[in-house]
Image: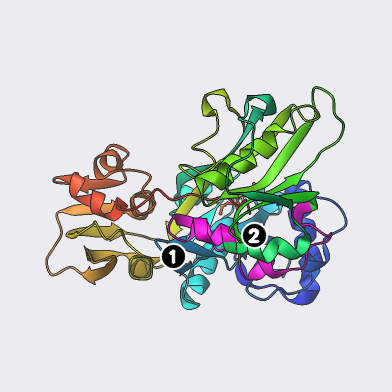
Amino acid sequence: MTVRVRPLADDELPAAWELGRLAFGGRREPPPEMLRPVPGILRLGAFDDRGRLVGKATDTGHEQWWGGRRLATADVGGVAVAPEARGTGVARAVLTDLLARARERGAAVSALFPTVSAPYRSLGWEVAGELVGIDLDAAALTRGRAPGTSVRPGRPGDLPAVTDLYERIAWSRSGLLTRRGGAFDLPSDGPWPNGADGATLVEQDGVLTGALVYRRGSGYGSDARLTADDLLATTPEAAHALVGVLGSWATVTPTVRLPLLRGDAVSALLPLERARPVSRDVWMHRPVDVVRAVADRGWPTAARGRVAFRLADDVAPWNAGDWELVVEDGGAELRVAGREPDLWLTVRGFAVLYCGASSGCAAVQAGLAGGADPARLDLLAAGPRAELLDYF
Ligand SMILES: CC(C)(COP(=O)(O)OP(=O)(O)OC[C@H]1O[C@@H](n2cnc3c(N)ncnc32)[C@H](O)[C@@H]1OP(=O)(O)O)[C@@H](O)C(=O)NCCC(=O)NCCS
């Protein structure tokens, strides 16, 4: 089958919604933003020789934080192929096209949450992390007020300040979304986003240092649960205050469900040995344009060095070639290598190293890299391990 891929016209959005609804079992009534263009979001459709819509994918237009710099990102969502057309190369066609367009608009990297990893592996994405939610017994949390903090209920009008607070946590890490632009700029359908019921805010000397945005859930029996959509703290005192408030729910919601961000102020206080993982969404990563992916992010100032490698990428051929990575002074560059490198990497190997999710030696054992002294490739893995806090 010949497949033609192009941006969906406005009057094709209902059919695209229906294709996604059939694949993912969504509700019959589409949310209004699915039926109109949203600035920053690109919806692509794949059409067969008779002009029928047989597949779709969305470039969400996100940005990710990488070492203090915003990286233009082509995160992918809503990949669906009509049942009758599956296994005939439709996803390959639409995602290859999406990558080419993403590069054209300046994107550097791409992430996605797969329902099945194999097709994305075949197209150069590799598993690099997971988004984990945990349940904890509220009664196990440390109670009590933290000195120097003032705790108050938040209002919907505080949400921009909560986004700023999130930014103070996210900017120096790797991979976290900026939560600005595209779908993040859409008005929420209620007073709070995603059906949240309220927020608890912590201030110190008039500065917002902690935020819990929560969904109350129903009832107050043994199975009642409070779910934190956001649990953010930039100081140990703010984390202490928020954990204390979470603990105060124990009498009516014996369980609290929390997002987990490795090594943050809140995790440092939680009894993680008692955590019960309840959700685990694996995500995959891929460079869209390796030159940009290296040059446009921040690198740890402690990292310094150079390593040359041959990179293979059949799906995004502009990435393929002999490169030398040079890291110094908090920045890096990918130059065309002067002579033939004695190390090689697949694009999936590049992805896991770039995300700090593997090492040169491990990548060789996984068949994603090869050559002499592969530990030299660890330079590409310098920096904090990449993570995501938002599902898309
Ligand atoms: C998953 C899905 C998008 C794949 O689309 P598709 O058009 O059938 O995939 P393609 O024919 O382009 O296949 C691309 C590659 O993935 C492989 N592949 C496709 N579906 C696969 C599956 N379910 N399991 C393992 N490999 C698979 C193909 O063999 C092919 O490999 P190759 O190119 O190395 O030979 C499609 O089956 C679908 O819409 N499923 C329901 C919705 C869904 O799960 N969407 C994904 C959300 S993340």
Residue shown at the point (54%, 41%) measured from the top left: 266
The reply to whether the magenta stretch includes residue 347 is no
Q: Mark 1, mark 2: which one is toward the viewer?
A: 2
Number of residues whose C-alpha sits closer than 10 Å to that of mark 1, classed few (under 14), some (14–19) or many (20 or more): many
Looking at the rendered structure, the secondary structure element under dot 1 is loop
Amino acid at dot 1: Val
Task: Give the mark nearer the N terminus: 1 vs 2.
Answer: 2
- Pick the residue in front: 143 or 274: 143
Tag 1–tag 2 contact (CB < 8 Å) = no
Q: Please state if 263 lies on the left or on the right of 205 as rendered.
A: left
Looking at the rendered structure, the secondary structure element under dot 2 is helix
Q: Please state if 114 lies on the left or on the right of 285 as rendered.
A: right
Q: Which residue is denoted by mark 2 in the rendering?
A: 162
Give the colour scheme shown.
rainbow
Residue shown at the point (67%, 76%) measured from the top left: 39
| Residue 62 image offset from top left, x and y in percent | 57, 65
* Mark pair 1, 2: CA separation: 30 Å
Number of residues whose C-alpha sits closer than 10 Å to that of mark 2, classed few (under 14), some (14–19) or many (20 or more): many
Quadrant assignment for the C terminus: bottom right
Mark 2 lies within 8 Å of ligand 1 (Cβ measured): no
- Against 103, residue 171 (above or below) is above
| Residue 145 image offset from top left, x and y in percent | 63, 39
